[in-house]
Image: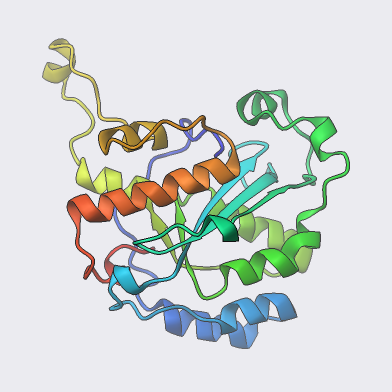
Amino acid sequence: MTDRRKVQQSGPVDTDHAQWPDHMAKLAESAINPTLRAFYQAGCVAPETPISEVPMVALDFETTGLDPDAHSIVSIGLIPMTLKRIYCRGAHHWILRPSLPLQQESVTIHGITHTDIAQAPDLAEILEEFLPAMAGKVMVVHHRGIERPFLDVALQWRLREGIEFPVIDTMAIEAHINPRRKLSWIGRLRGGRPVSIRLPDARARYGLPHYAPHHALVDALASAELLQAQIQTHYSEDTPVGDLWY
């Protein structure tokens, strides 16, 4: 996972895509690239579907920076899941050759070096494997300001058309659960500490084990486990997915 401390934290739930199935159907009609068209044709579940019945994919990117218009994806971690199970056998991890140069700050965070990417494929070379792994699923991410915007820009650059898909944002769920996470001035005077909604801190509140951060597949797994814990603690298996996705 790219270090997201500098990225604005998630706000209120979006309402633009309450009807994702209809939206995906329209995108399937307009898509030109056949792999992208097949992705949209797989559709997604109806918004009233209980979260326990929703097929999902936990997704995480490492990037060369935080701006999708100025930085590139350098690795992808993906793991299929449901509310009850994480399918490790279906996991994928790709190191990619970014279209823009690595920056020392990002190398320090994720540890992917120039040597690692020297023989790595471009994102375009893995799309026929990557997009089918996402097709028909709801993506699970920790901060929707990274994966969807970065992939959209990357595909616009390569295919001349972007991508849209529903996501469940575990960071947004934590923000909703902890609406008063920012301390008042009195709280600060009393030595209180704000509630962090970063992935490692959120996991710790649910008693989940600590994983070393900034490896895309490990962070995808961490997000998958966090969502399962969040639903078990604060929601129910019957919660409609439309109440959780963006």
Q: Is residue 63 left or right of residue 117?
A: left
| Nearest to the observer: residue 19 or residue 77 | 77
In the rendered view, would you say 212 is above or below 224? above
Residue farthest to the right? 119
Residue 155: quarter of image: bottom right
Residue, far bottom: 29
Q: Nearer the viewer, residue 91 or 75?
A: 91
Q: Could you tell me residue 240's position as x and y percent?
A: 26, 71
Q: Please say if 237 is above or below 214.
A: below
The N terminus lies in quadrant:
top right
- Residue 3 lies, in percent from the top left, at 53, 32
How does the figure colour the protein chain or chains? Answer: rainbow
Q: Position of residue 122 (x, y in %)?
A: 81, 53
Q: Residue at x 38, y 41 (%)?
A: 9
How many tags in the picture? 0
From this viewpoint, is residue 67 visible?
no
Residue 176 seen: yes
Name the residue rendered at 68%, 28% in the picture. Answer: 111
* The furthest residue to the front: 89
Residue at x 63%, y 84% (from the top left corner): 30
Question: Which quadrant of the rendered structure holds the C terminus?
Answer: bottom left
At horizontal 54% and vertical 56% (from top left) the residue drawn is 79
Residue 187: give x, y in percent of width and height.
14, 19
153 left or right, relative to 4: right
Q: Is residue 89 above or below residue 46?
A: above
